[in-house]
Image (cartoon, grey):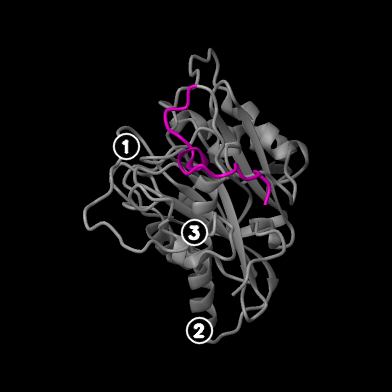
């Protein structure tokens, strides 16, 4: 398995990602959309999720596709980012047709970044405007690290961030991951520079340190307060909504490989999965199995990249990976 040309979720043709952030607020929004509505599913493993429209993604519900997905900081306040995205999409004539009306379907998930040193004394909720701005910035090329929904993200020991990765399967299908890493647990092994996701690294996409030589037997430190890692898996394989849900479920294995501990009662860990439907998928059960494995490994890699590419900012409560390990700061672009 190898990464796609840009090692971004947008290696899945037809997808765009937009970021917007307020550096004073230390928070932001990331939006994913396609050239056409996307078949979507979701699976939630964390004990403290914050979501909008996720019930609609169950396989037995009437609406089978979404117009966009939103990942946002801001805790529950950040759910308003989807309102800004909906308004902009409606103005473009997008959405589920009901008579002569269009209702954009925009599920959203949030992470808790209210205690990260940013100025949260807003008079009016800023997230609708950030959502609209992120949509306007949508493009196949986008930044990683301390941007979008990852702007003020943290882990137990390091600054978090926005990560992405992709993989090309032997079948020719492409799988990509997009994640805002804001975990209660750690992304690195003990005090070392090694990432828990090291065994799945491709090339030097997050430093090339490889797997750790030894692993602690006790639970790593965890941070106080809220957390949550929220992610999107995308593929060009033609999937039903039920299969998208299964893909999202399998991808959670990647979160558990890259963050220790994960899926805790204080995390709202969630994975969306979307399909563009561009390429048929074989009926052979191994085809879906391979997609699930690729989704898990892509998500693990994307999590490590999000932390690896984080950059420092004023009043950060935690250091970045590069600050601790005396490494040259990597570019936020792949």
User: Which one is in front, 209 or 236?
Assistant: 209
Whole-percent x and y of residue 301? 52, 59
| Callout 2 secondary element | helix
Q: Which residue is mark 2?
A: 286
Q: CA distance from mark 3 to mark 2?
A: 32 Å
| Callout 3 secondary element | loop
Q: Residue at x 78, y 40 (%)?
A: 92
Considering the whole magenta stretch, tell me its main secondary structure. Answer: loop
Find residue 223 and name its label.
1
Q: CA distance from mark 1 to mark 2?
A: 39 Å
Left or right of 76 on screen, residue 93: right
Find residue 7 and name its label.
none
Whole-percent x and y of residue 42? 48, 56
Whole-percent x and y of residue 187? 41, 50
Is residue 237 located in the magenta-colored stretch of the structure?
A: no
Disc 1 packing (10 Å; few <14; some 14–19; many ≥20): some
């Amino acid at each position: 398995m190898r990464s796609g040309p840009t090692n971004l979720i947008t290696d899945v043709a037809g997808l765009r990602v937009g970021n917007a952030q307020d550096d004073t607020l230390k928070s932001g929004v990331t939006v994913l959309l396609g050239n056409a509505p996307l078949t979507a599913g979701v699976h939630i493993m964390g004990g403290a999720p914050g979501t909008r429209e996720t019930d609609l993604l169950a396989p037995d519900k009437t609406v089978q596709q979404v117009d966009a997905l939103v990942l946002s900081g801001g805790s529950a306040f950040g759910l308003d980012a989807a309102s800004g995205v909906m308004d902009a999409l409606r103005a473009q004539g997008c959405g589920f047709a009901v008579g002569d009306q269009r209702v954009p379907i925009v599920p959203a998930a949030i992470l808790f970044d209210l205690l990260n040193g940013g100025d949260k004394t807003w008079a009016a909720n800023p997230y609708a405007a950030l959502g609209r701005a992120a949509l306007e910035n949508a493009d196949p090329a986008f930044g990683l690290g301390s941007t979008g929904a990852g702007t003020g993200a943290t882990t137990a020991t390091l600054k978090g961030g926005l990560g992405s990765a992709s993989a090309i399967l032997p079948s020719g299908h492409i799988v990509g991951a997009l994640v805002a890493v804001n975990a209660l647990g750690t992304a690195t092994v003990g005090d070392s520079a090694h990432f828990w996701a090291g065994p799945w690294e491709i090339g030097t996409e997050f430093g090339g340190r490889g797997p750790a030589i030894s692993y602690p037997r006790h639970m790593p430190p965890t941070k106080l307060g809220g957390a949550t890692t929220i992610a999107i898996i995308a593929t060009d394989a033609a999937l039903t909504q039920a299969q998208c849900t299964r893909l999202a479920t399998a991808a959670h294995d990647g979160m558990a490989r890259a963050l220790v501990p994960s899926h805790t009662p204080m995390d709202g860990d969630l994975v969306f999965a979307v399909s563009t439907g561009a390429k048929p998928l074989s009926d052979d059960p191994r085809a879906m199995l391979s997609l699930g494995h690729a989704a898990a490994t892509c998500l693990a890699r994307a999590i490590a990249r999000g932390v690896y590419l984080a950059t420092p900012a004023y009043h950060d409560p935690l250091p970045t990976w590069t600050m601790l390990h005396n490494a040259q700061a990597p570019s936020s672009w792949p």
